[in-house]
Image (tube, helix red, strand yellow):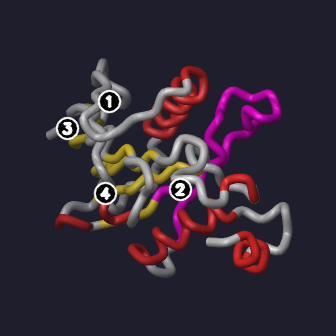
Amino acid sequence: MDLETYRARWPEEDSSPGWDAIEDALAAVYGDQKPKHYAPALHAALGGPDPIDGISLYRSTAGGVAHLHLVTYGFSQLYYDEALLGKPYSRFGFELTLRLRQDPADDEMPSWAINMAQNIARYVFKSGRWFEPGHCMPAEGRRDRRARPAGRAPRDEPAAGHRPRAALSDVARTQAKT
């Protein structure tokens, strides 16, 4: 995209082209579904501990299994920045997605998964290191008495469309206790 097209599509400098791109990719998968959305009470830019601007949760039955699809907003550049035009990726160039098995009748927010995403973000933002397919994070301890982490392994997220750098997907698959 050239500068003229960028300015025409987002005429206000307080717009959010990166956020729009994530929402467009998810709308192609989930249509008009309104996700649950989590935003930190105090973002890191304002002195809070949470570097991710937001996390949305979509209900899905992809693959024949009822689950929540959690998607972060903030590892990539979300807001207007002309200096990023022509770059291969923005900021870290990925977003986290997690697929969490959950009974469709369960309306509880998976706070452990939201906290885990923010903890991963703290690591990435502090260290400057990102994740790509083949990287591994150990799954230590239970995050929720109803869930059992089976492992965390980065991979591409085909449902989210093209990403210039690999997306971190399925970092926390869980199984309901039987």
Left or right of residue 80: residue 18: left
Residue 62 point in image, percent of width and height: 25, 67
Q: Amino acid at mark 2?
A: Ser
Mark 1: secondary structure: loop
On residue 145, which mark appears?
A: 1
* Marks 2, 3: nearer the viewer: 2
**Label 1 sits on what residue type?**
Arg
Crowding at label 1, few (<14), some or many (≥20) Cα neighbours within 10 Å?
Answer: few
Residue name at image x 67 percent, y 54 percent: 84
- Which quadrant is the C terminus positioned in? top left
Q: Is residue 45 magenta?
A: yes
**Residue positioned 27% across, 67% down in the render:** 61
- Residue 165 on the magenta segment: no
Q: Which is nearer the N-term, disc 1 or disc 4? A: 4
Q: Which residues are magenta?
A: 34-57
- What amino acid is labelled 3 in the image? Lys
Q: Earlier in the sequence, mark 3 or mark 4?
A: 4
Q: CA distance from mark 1 to mark 4?
A: 17 Å
Instruction: Say whether marks 3 and 1 touch (CB < 8 Å).
Output: yes
Label 3 to label 1: alpha-carbon separation: 8 Å
Q: Earlier in the sequence, mark 3 or mark 1?
A: 1
* Tag 4 residue: 67
Q: Earlier in the sequence, mark 1 or mark 2?
A: 2
Residue with the mark numbered 3: 177
Residue type, mark 4 in image: His
Picture disc at residue 56: 2
Q: Nearer the viewer, mark 1 or mark 2?
A: 2
Closer to the N terminus: mark 2 or mark 3?
2
Specify whether 48 is left or right of 65.
right
